Amino acid sequence: MVDHAAVPDHFLAGARDRRVPFRLAEVGHQAVGACFDGTTGPGHDQVRAGFQIRELCRPDGDRGVSRLPADVRLIIREPAHPDQLRIGRVDERVRLAGELYERAIFNGETDGLSTADRELDAAEADLVLARGKVLHGRFLENRVEDPRELELFERALALYNAVEDERGQAVAFFWIGCFHQVVRDDAESAVSALTLSRELATKTGDDLTLSYALRHLGIVAHLTGNLDEARALLEESTAVRRTLGFTAGVAANLVGLIYLADGDDARALADEAAELAASVGATSISAQVEEARSRL
C-alpha cells in the first residue's frame, strides 16, 4: 500500500506544481505502481492511469476507478482543492488548445492556433467515437437502431483522416463495419469497412483493433457459409488476443469456434471458454458459452 503519494505532474496535465493526494490499493497479489499501461478496447489501448483519473475522479469522497483492469484499483482521496480535480479531468489536447489560445491573444503567437485546431480535431474524434460506441451498446440492449450511431462513427473517421491518424482510422473503420454488420445486417458494407480496418490496424501495429476486425470478418464468413475461412479468421484473432492477454476476448472467440467444431473438439472449446469467461467475470460470455454447449 502506498498512502498519500503525490500524483506525478504528467498525471495532471496543466496542473503544473499542483498535485492531488491519492492512495494506491494493492488488490490480490499484485502491488500496483504509480503508473501502468493497459487495454480496454479498440481505440483505448495504452491508456495511462493518469487518463483514467482525469476522467473518473470526483470531488465527493473516495471512489474507485471502475474502468481499470480487475486487478488494479485507484482511489482518489482528500483532494486539496476542487479545481485540481476539474483540471485533472480536462483532456490534455483540450488543455493544450486553451494554452495555445492564450499564447495567441497575450503573446501574439498566432501560429499555434493551427496546432490547436489539430489537437481539438483529434480530441473530438475520440469523443464522437466513444459516443457512437455508447449508442451501439444501447442497440445491443434494446435492438432499436439510433441513426446517430453511424453518423458519429463516420464523423470520427473524417476527423482521424483530417489529422492523418491511421491508427484512429483503423478503429473508426472497425466500428463502421460493426454497425453495418450488427445493426443493418449488411454484410457487403461490413466487409468493406472491416477489411480496411484490418489493413490499417496491421500497418500501424494496433493488434487489439486487428483482433476485432479479424473476429468480425470471421463472423461474416461463418454466416455466408465459408466455414474454413471463418475458422481461420477466428483462430488468427484468438492468437492475437492470447498474446495481448485479452481473456474475455479469447473466450468470446472460442464461442464462435464451438459452432465450427464437432464432438470432443467442440466440448473442449466450450470448457476452455467457460473457464476463461469465469476467470474475468465475463458473465455475458459465460451465457453464450452455455447456449453453444446446449447445442452440442
Image (cartoon, rainbow, N blue to C red):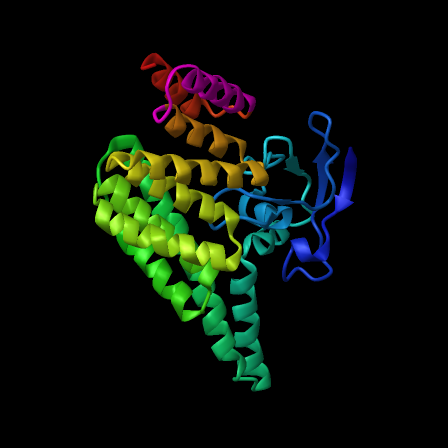
Relative to the observer, which residue lies in front, 45 or 205?
Answer: 205
Residue at 41% across / 24% down in the picture? 284
Compared to residue 138, the image places residue 158 above or below, namely below
Residue at 29% across / 49% down in the picture? 191
Residue 231 x %, y %: 38, 34
Compared to residue 292, the image places residue 239 above or below, namely below
Q: Which of the image's four quarters has the C terminus? A: top left
Relative to the observer, which residue lies in front, 113 or 231?
Answer: 231
Relative to the observer, which residue lies in front, 150 or 268?
Answer: 268
The reply, left or right, for residue 163 in relation to residue 177 is: right
Quarter holding residue 137 = top left
Query: What type of secondary structure mainly makes up the magenta span?
Result: helix
Quarter holding residue 222 = top left
Any part of residue 170 in sight: yes
Any part of residue 149 in sight: no
The reply, left or right, for residue 203 in relation to residue 9 is: left
The reply, left or right, for residue 92 in relation to residue 151 is: right
Residue at 67% across / 45% down in the picture? 36
Q: Which of the image's four quarters has the N terminus? A: top right
Relative to the observer, which residue lies in front, 59 or 284?
Answer: 284
| Magenta stretch holds residue 146 | no
| Magenta stretch holds residue 276 | yes
Residue 229 x %, y %: 35, 39
User: Farthest residue toward the bottom?
Assistant: 108
User: How many discs appear?
Assistant: 0
Residue 240 x %, y %: 52, 41
Write down the region rendered in magenta. 259-279
Residue 267 x %, y %: 43, 16
Residue at 53% across / 57% down in the picture? 91
